[in-house]
């Protein structure tokens, strides 16, 4: 039994650094947030959410304010998205939510645009104005159709 | 060799293979039992973590930075054709976390640490040390094998995370300092392109599974080696070959099953 | 397992008896009906040419090998049918000195000798330390506790291994070629140690060897292995025997250690007069 305090120290440091790396990967890269600034839930319904996934960020003016925590179909076969937002957020009742893509190859996220009303949305309410994901095929299709119509 | 003997040989090989599987399974169960029941060999496990982990740090870090740098370079050249250099962080990140990290770490680990363990145990067989233990009523699997196996198993996921981190750093160095990308953008795309469930979890799972495979293969080959100098050599090379193959095959299986 | 205050009376009758043992290893039949006995309190030397099965016999006693047929009784118990678990308990009464020592090279001499105590007794570290020191002094290695086996010469290794073999006060001590590869001074040293240990602890001691001179001096009885069987008797019986195989063996070994084929362990040269 080689009791070498130095050896133990080194092993301890190794394990710490290793777990630190795992922690970095898990929280920073993986996006698991354990200081959850969420709690304020809103809903938004879209015709087409495109490639929007759970955990997709929700931002206002480019600043992340929360994330998508659920996606499901409602009775009208539209996509109802659950948003988990920071509780300090104040959104007027006429705010809108649109699905955008970050960059060309990037992931999709939800951008919230605040409205002009004085009343604010309460927890559990639904955002009235939504803009579905831009679908490249539809865009091209529309373009082709319009071009056809002109001819 | 006519057809009859060839078939005969094939049959033999198959039976041998299955018998070997049975032996390895029994060996593994013995290790598990030794780990679960007292006495607990904490000191020896710590020593094993030191031997296989700390002493592998040099090559893991060096390889990590190098691989990351290469990925950065290669990724940049490919992405710049589409004007998508901004996504370099994402491309590098995903390939490292999901595939290159776990697989390369495991392969490097096999070559450096696992083969050393196999050689050590095999030479203990040769010099009669294991028999000596048995005669002293000490179970070699409890005293020698299990701590080393557990040590290797604990170390591999840690090394994997370190490898990936160092590779990120290597890619960052190349991308930012050499190729002139924006450091902040690199990191943001890298960090936001992956999720824990899809990517990090797979990485950890893979390195854990690889850890199990490597530690069992290395200790088994050492333990069952012939008590000669050739036996030690065969145990070492056999470990590297079998473990590497197992890693690559399992990698495919996990990647396919995970589905993403 | 507190056995360190053992008096002579509490020592059981640790007789070893082989009866009709048959064993084939690989494609060689090592024993074809081996019958012999090893008496408590005596040193029995097992003689025989290389390949006659001396080491194998010891491994059979320790349960590291099982015979194909026949019976082996240790202290009255038939060991050929015991499970590994039950064998472990028997082995706690046996100390074995392996050829070359077989100390664990990753541990110090002290830790090596202390191992059986740490594993099988509940002694405090202080008591263990005392016991280990006592044994190391007895074998002439008082300052070597902190060294590693690779730092020791062949002779010192052997003596450290002997200390380990007797540290738990076993009832049976098995020594596999304790003199192999040693210079004459160390051979004599080990021989004296074995005789003294046997006299003081009243053990059943089994020694395998080639070194006729030492064997004749220290043996109370001799078991001579030939043709897969055993011929037993006192040393005098052996010298007086007119069995041609025995005569041939005794004559051929007249050249002493040079005539044997023991490998020199660990490739070290033993300096004559190795004073440690």
Image (cartoon, rainbow, N blue to C red):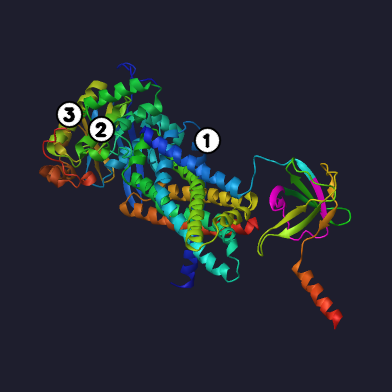
| Few, some or many residues within 10 Å of mark 3 (<14, 14–19, 20+) | some
Q: What residue is shown at x 33% (from left), y 18% (from top)?
A: C6
Q: What residue is shown at x 35% (from left), y 49% (from top)?
A: C25
Percent position of residue B246, x then y? 51, 56
Q: How many marks?
A: 3
Q: What residue is shown at x 57% (from left), y 69% (from top)?
A: B80
Q: Which residues are magenta?
A: A42-66
Q: Earlier in the sequence, mark 3 or mark 2?
A: 2
| Few, some or many residues within 10 Å of mark 2 (<14, 14–19, 20+) | many
Which is nearer the eye, B236 or A90? A90
Percent position of residue C211, x then y? 17, 39
Q: Quadrant of the N terminus of chain C?
A: top left
SS type, badge 1:
helix
- Distance from the alpha carbon under mark 2 to that under mark 1: 33 Å
Q: What residue is shown at x 38% (from left), y 53% (from top)?
A: B236
| Few, some or many residues within 10 Å of mark 1 (<14, 14–19, 20+) | few
Judging by the rendered image, the residue that carries numbered circle 2 is: C160
The image shows residue A137, relative to residue B102, as above or below, that is: below
Percent position of residue C187, x then y? 16, 35
Label 1 or label 3, whichever lies nearer to me, is: 1
Judging by the rendered image, the residue that carries numbered circle 1 is: B36
The image shows residue B34, relative to residue A133, as above or below, that is: above
């Amino acid at each position: 039994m080689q009791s070498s305090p130095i050896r133990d120290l080194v092993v301890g440091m190794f394990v710490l650094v290793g777990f630190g790396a795992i922690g970095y990967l898990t929280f920073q890269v993986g996006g698991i947030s354990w200081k959850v600034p969420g709690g304020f839930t809103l809903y938004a319904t879209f015709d087409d959410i495109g490639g929007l996934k759970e955990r997709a960020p929700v931002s206002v003016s480019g600043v992340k304010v929360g994330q998508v925590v659920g996606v499901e179909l409602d009775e009208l076969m539209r996509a109802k998205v659950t948003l988990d937002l920071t509780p300090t957020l104040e959104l007027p009742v006429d705010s809108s939510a649109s699905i955008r893509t970050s960059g060309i190859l990037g992931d999709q996220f939800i951008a919230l645009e605040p409205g002009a009303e004085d009343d604010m949305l309460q927890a559990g309410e639904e955002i009235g104005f939504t803009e579905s994901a831009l679908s490249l095929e539809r865009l091209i299709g529309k373009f082709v159709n319009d071009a056809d119509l002109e001819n | 060799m006519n057809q009859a003997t060839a078939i005969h040989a094939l049959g033999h090989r198959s039976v041998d293979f299955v018998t070997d599987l049975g032996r390895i399974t029994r060996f593994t169960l013995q290790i598990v039992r030794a780990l679960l029941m007292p006495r607990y060999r904490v000191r020896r496990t710590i020593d094993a973590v030191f031997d296989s982990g700390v002493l592998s740090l040099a090559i893991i870090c060096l390889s990590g930075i190098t691989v990351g740098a290469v990925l950065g370079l290669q990724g940049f050249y490919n992405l710049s054709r589409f004007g998508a250099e901004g996504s370099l962080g994402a491309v590098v990140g995903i390939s490292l976390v999901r595939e290159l990290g776990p697989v390369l770490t495991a392969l490097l680990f096999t070559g450096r640490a696992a083969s050393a363990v196999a050689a050590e145990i095999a030479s203990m067989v040769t010099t009669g040390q294991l028999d000596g233990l048995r005669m002293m009523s000490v179970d070699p699997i409890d005293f020698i094998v299990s701590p080393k196996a557990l040590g290797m198993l604990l170390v591999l996921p840690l090394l994997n995370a370190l490898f990936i981190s160092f590779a990120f750093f290597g890619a960052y160095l190349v991308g930012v300092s050499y190729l002139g990308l924006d450091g902040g953008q690199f990191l943001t795309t890298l960090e936001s392109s992956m999720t824990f469930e899809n990517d990090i979890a797979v990485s950890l799972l893979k390195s854990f599974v690889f850890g199990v495979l490597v530690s069992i293969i290395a200790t088994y080959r050492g333990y069952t080696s012939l008590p000669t100098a050739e036996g030690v050599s065969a145990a070492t090379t056999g470990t590297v070959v079998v473990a590497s193959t197992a890693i690559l095959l399992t990698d495919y299986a996990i990647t396919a099953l995970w589905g993403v | 397992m507190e056995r360190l205050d053992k008096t002579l009376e509490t020592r059981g009758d640790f007789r070893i008896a082989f009866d009709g043992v048959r064993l084939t290893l690989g494609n060689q039949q090592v024993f074809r009906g081996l019958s012999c006995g090893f008496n408590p309190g005596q040193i029995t030397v097992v003689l025989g040419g290389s390949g006659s099965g001396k080491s194998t016999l010891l491994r059979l006693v320790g349960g590291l090998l099982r015979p194909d047929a026949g019976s082996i009784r240790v202290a009255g118990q038939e060991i050929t049918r015991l499970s590994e678990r039950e064998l472990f308990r028997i082995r706690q009464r046996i100390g074995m000195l392996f050829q070359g020592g077989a100390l664990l090279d990753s541990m110090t001499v002290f830790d090596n000798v202390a191992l059986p105590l740490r594993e099988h007794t509940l002694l405090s570290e202080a008591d263990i330390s005392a016991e280990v020191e006592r044994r190391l002094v007895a074998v002439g290695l008082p300052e070597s506790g902190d060294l590693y086996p690779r730092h020791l010469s062949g002779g010192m290794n052997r003596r450290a291994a002997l200390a380990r073999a007797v540290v738990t006060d076993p009832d049976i001590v098995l020594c596999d070629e304790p003199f192999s590869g040693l210079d004459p001074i160390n051979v004599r040293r080990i021989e004296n140690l074995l005789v003294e240990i046997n006299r003081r602890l009243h053990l059943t001691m089994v020694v395998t060897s080639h070194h006729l001179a030492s064997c004749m001096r220290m043996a109370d009885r001799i078991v001579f292995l030939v043709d897969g069987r055993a011929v037993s008797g006192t040393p005098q019986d052996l010298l007086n025997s007119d069995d041609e195989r025995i005569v041939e063996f005794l004559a051929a070994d007249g050249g002493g250690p040079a005539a044997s084929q023991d490998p020199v362990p660990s490739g070290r040269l033993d300096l004559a007069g190795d004073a440690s």
